[in-house]
Image: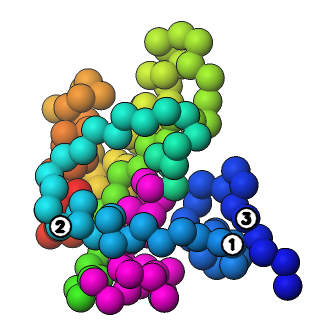
Amino acid sequence: MATLYPIGIQNFEKIRKEGYVYIDKTALIHQMVKTGSYYFLSRPRRFGKSLLISTLEAYFQGKKELFKGLAMEQLEQDWLEYPILHLDLNTGKYDSPERLLYVLDDALHNWELLYGTSETEKTPELRFKGIIRRAYEKRGRRV
C-alpha cells in the first residue's frame, strides 16, 4: 500500500479517516489547551495553522475516535463537547468592506439559528457577543 501524504489537505478528520500520514503533535496541542488562555497564531502561509485549528475543532467536538493511536488519546480523560463557532475566511475574496460584512452576516445568521437572536443586538459585534453568551447558556460550556 502506498504512503498517502496529505498535500494541500487541512482537515484533520479527513486526514485521519482516509489514512493519510499524520505527524502526531497532539501532545503539544493538549498542553496548549490545558495551560493556555488565548492564542494569536502568527505563522507564515502554508505553516499548518488551518490543520491546527481543524485538530482543535475535532478535539473540542469530543471526537475521541479521530485521536486513536495519538498522544491525545492517552492524555485526555474527559472528551467533553464544547460549542464551536468556526469562521473560515479562506474561502472568499474580500475586495470590498461590503463583501466581508456579507460573509460575517451570513455566519452570524447561521449561528443565530442554532443559539437564538435578540432584538437589541443590531451590530455584528453585539450579535457575536450575544451568540457567544447564548451558546454558553445553552450548552453550559465555554465557547
Q: Position of residue 71 (x, y in %)?
A: 38, 81
**CA gap, disc 1 and disc 2:** 27 Å
Q: Residue tagged by mark 3?
A: 5
Task: Find residue 45 and report its horizontal and vertical position in percent.
Answer: 55, 34
At x 27%, y 83%, the residue is: 76
Judge from the rendering whether residue 16 lies leftward or rightward of residue 59; answer left or right. right
Q: Which residues are magenta?
A: 52-75
In the displayed structure, 47 sits above or below 29; it is above
Q: Please tell me which of labels 3 and 1 falls first in the chain.
A: 3
Residue 47: image location, x then y, percent: 52, 43
Mark 2 or mark 3: whose residue is earlier in sequence: 3
**Residue type pointed to by label 2:** Lys
Residue 108: x, y in percent?
A: 38, 40
Dominant SS type (magenta): helix
Check residue 126 in the rendering and tell me which mark sits there, or answer none: none
From mark 2 to mark 3, how far is it between C-alphas?
Answer: 30 Å
Give me the disc on residue 34. Answer: 2
* Residue 36 is inside the magenta segment: no
Residue drawn at the location 19% of the way across and 39% of the way down: 129
Observer-nearest of 78 and 31: 31
User: Label 3 near label 2: C-beta < 8 Å?
Assistant: no
